[in-house]
Image (spheres, grey):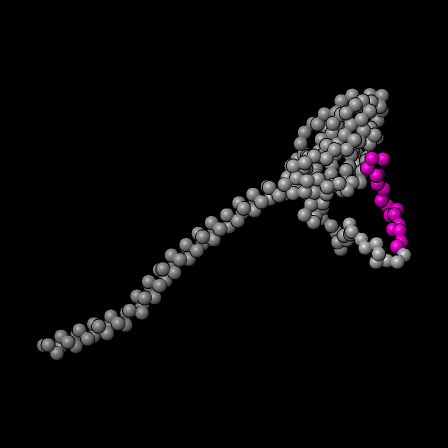
Amino acid sequence: MPGQWINSFRISVTTLIAYIPVIATVVTCFFSLILARATLRYVEATDKGLALAREEFEREWTPDLHIKLERVSATEAKVIVTNLAKSSVLLQLLQLRRLSHAMPFERCRLNDPLVGGMTWSQEMGKRILACTDTDFEGPIAASITFYAAGRMFRTDWFRSTIQVRDGRIVSLEPSNMPARRVRVIERKGPERRREFVQDVTGNATPTQAEPRQDEKFFVTGA
């Protein structure tokens, strides 16, 4: 009897030892599932945090310009550009047009920096009157093209309502905000950059660049 009991106990211990790897595998799979769910939750939380950080960064550093046309006198008006963002920009081109026409009436080349939170203004009475007839009442729009962070942007058209009588500005009031913020201007083909600093001593006989025939521009203050 004692020998039979010892043999049965030995068999039970052997069976238990055989089941230990199976039990360990099941426990390992259980904890692996728990760790996998915790990892997924951590990844989701990290993605949400990165999305919020990116949104906050873009809100603070994305260029945002506001354009306003203001009447100075019966024959003079000025364009006021305010940089609402933190990043500095380089103003390149000012365009004016009537909304009834698709193409801009006036293009004014610029090369003026505008620091974040500051305002730039320029008298544009003659150019604004050039967009209208001697007697005109209706909306006109202005847009700015500028460089920021190595890319070129362009604002939407900021509208203003103007009233002109006998070639004199009677009233000029902003009408509404644009529907979109600034957008990046996509370049087609190879990118060509213009060097703002050139080595004048590198070439012994500097040549003057020929103006392009298909490009017309106005000098600021002309």
> Where is residue 90, by image quadrant?
top right
Residue 204: say if magenta: no
Q: Residue at x 74, y 33 (%)?
A: 121
| x then y, percent, for residue 60 | 60, 41
- Taking the view exactly as shown, the residue that stands out farthest to the left is 1
| x then y, percent, for residue 16 | 24, 70
**What are the residue bounds of the magenta stretch?**
206-222
> Where is residue 89, by image quadrant?
top right
Residue 143 vs 6, above or below: the answer is: above
Residue 208: say if magenta: yes
Residue 114 vs 23, above or below: the answer is: above
| x then y, percent, for residue 29 | 36, 62
Quadrant of the rendering where the C terminus is positioned: top right
Q: Magenta-highlighted stretch: main secondary structure?
A: loop
Quadrant of the rendering where the N terminus is positioned: bottom left
Residue 178 vs 147, above or below: the answer is: above
Residue sitting nearer the eye, 147 or 49: 147
Residue 161 visible in the picture: no
210 relative position to 11: left or right: right
| x then y, percent, for residue 201 | 84, 56
